[in-house]
Image: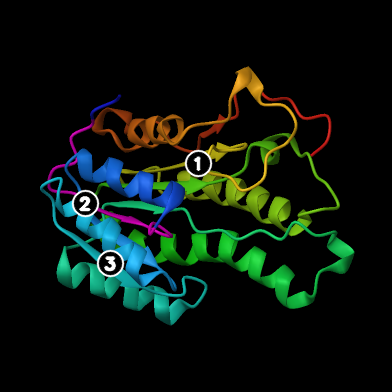
């Protein structure tokens, strides 16, 4: 396991009450960062995750926000700054999906998927940038999807593929826009993770990605020695090459 030194840093992981986001938050706590556990409706789970982080000897707080709403995003950061300090590490983990055929989706479902994956990533990154630029240090890690790099699409879950392709474009744009600011912006793009509710027929390398696989990539990107690495996307897919999705 990589062991970056995040002591004195504040990390905010969106959607970190449970699952992959929780694994990211606790890994950052293990690395010494104080942690903001973000949630939308899962208050009890978020408070439990924050308590687990505090057991690791760091400060942690759970904050509710709809990260598709600019005012709620500002409230999230204001609360984090008041309780723990300016956010140094931002992990944009939130993102819903809709596994129906695109033509059967209501406009509201389409918008929800695009907003939670892409708009939320933009809004949280935009709010984090000011303090990061003042500090001349920051790490932003976005969550993509493995097939987006290859342009693979399917009629099912189509707005998710659109949004995740946008996340990769946003990652590279923001990396270029912050290249003189001491900030790195990268993406982690898993295929299927062991915590998933649905699995395809065959797993690459005989298994699905573990939470530890994803955490390794995160710890690499937030490490002090990774300051020259920006605009990159790491696919955590076991070498999966989709014929279709």
Query: Which residue is found at the position 26% from the left and 74% from the top?
Result: 78
- Judged from the image, the secondary structure of the residue bearing numbered disc 3 is strand
Residue indicated by mark 2:
53
> Could you tell me residue 115's position as x and y percent?
60, 68
> Could you tell me residue 139's position as x and y percent?
34, 45
Tell me if residue 213 can be seen: yes
- Judged from the image, the secondary structure of the residue bearing numbered disc 2 is helix
Q: Residues within 10 Å of mark 3 (few under 14, many from 20)?
A: many
Asked whether disc 2 touches disc 3, contact meaning CB atoms under 8 Å apart, the reply is no
Q: In terms of sequence position, does the residue under pointer 2 or pointer 3 come before the other? A: 2
- Spatial CA span between label 2 and label 3: 11 Å
Q: Which residues are magenta?
A: 4-17
- Spatial CA span between label 1 and label 2: 24 Å
| Residue 217 in the image: above or below residue 182 | above
Query: Which residue is found at the position 21% from the left and 38% from the top?
Result: 31
Residue at the far bottom in the pictured view: 71
Q: Quadrant of the N terminus?
A: top left
Residue indicated by mark 1:
187
Q: Quadrant of residue 208?
A: top right
Q: Is residue 5 magenta?
A: yes
């Amino acid at each position: 396991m990589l062991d970056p030194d995040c002591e004195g840093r504040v990390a905010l992981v969106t959607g970190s009450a449970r699952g992959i986001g929780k694994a990211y938050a606790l890994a950052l706590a293990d690395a010494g960062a104080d942690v903001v556990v973000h949630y939308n409706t899962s208050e009890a789970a978020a408070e439990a995750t924050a308590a687990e982080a505090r057991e690791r000897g760091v400060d942690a707080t759970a904050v509710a926000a709809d990260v598709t709403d600019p005012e709620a995003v500002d409230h999230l950061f204001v609360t984090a700054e008041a309780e723990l300090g300016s956010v140094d590490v931002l992990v944009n983990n939130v993102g819903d999906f809709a596994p129906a055929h695109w033509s059967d989706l209501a406009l509201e479902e389409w918008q929800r998927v695009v907003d939670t994956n892409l708009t939320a990533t933009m809004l949280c990154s935009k709010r984090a940038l000011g303090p990061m630029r003042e500090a001349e240090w920051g790490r932003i890690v976005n969550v993509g999807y493995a097939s987006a790099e290859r342009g693979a699409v399917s009629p099912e879950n189509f707005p998710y593929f659109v949004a995740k392709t946008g996340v990769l474009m946003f990652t590279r744009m923001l990396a270029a826009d912050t290249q003189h600011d001491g900030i790195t912006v990268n993406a982690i793009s898993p295929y299927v993770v062991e915590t998933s509710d649905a699995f395809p027929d065959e797993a690459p390398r005989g298994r699905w990605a573990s939470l530890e696989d994803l955490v390794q990539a995160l710890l690499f990107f937030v490490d002090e020695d990774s300051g020259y690495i920006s605009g990159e996307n790491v696919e955590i897919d076991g070498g999966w090459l989709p014929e279709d999705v």
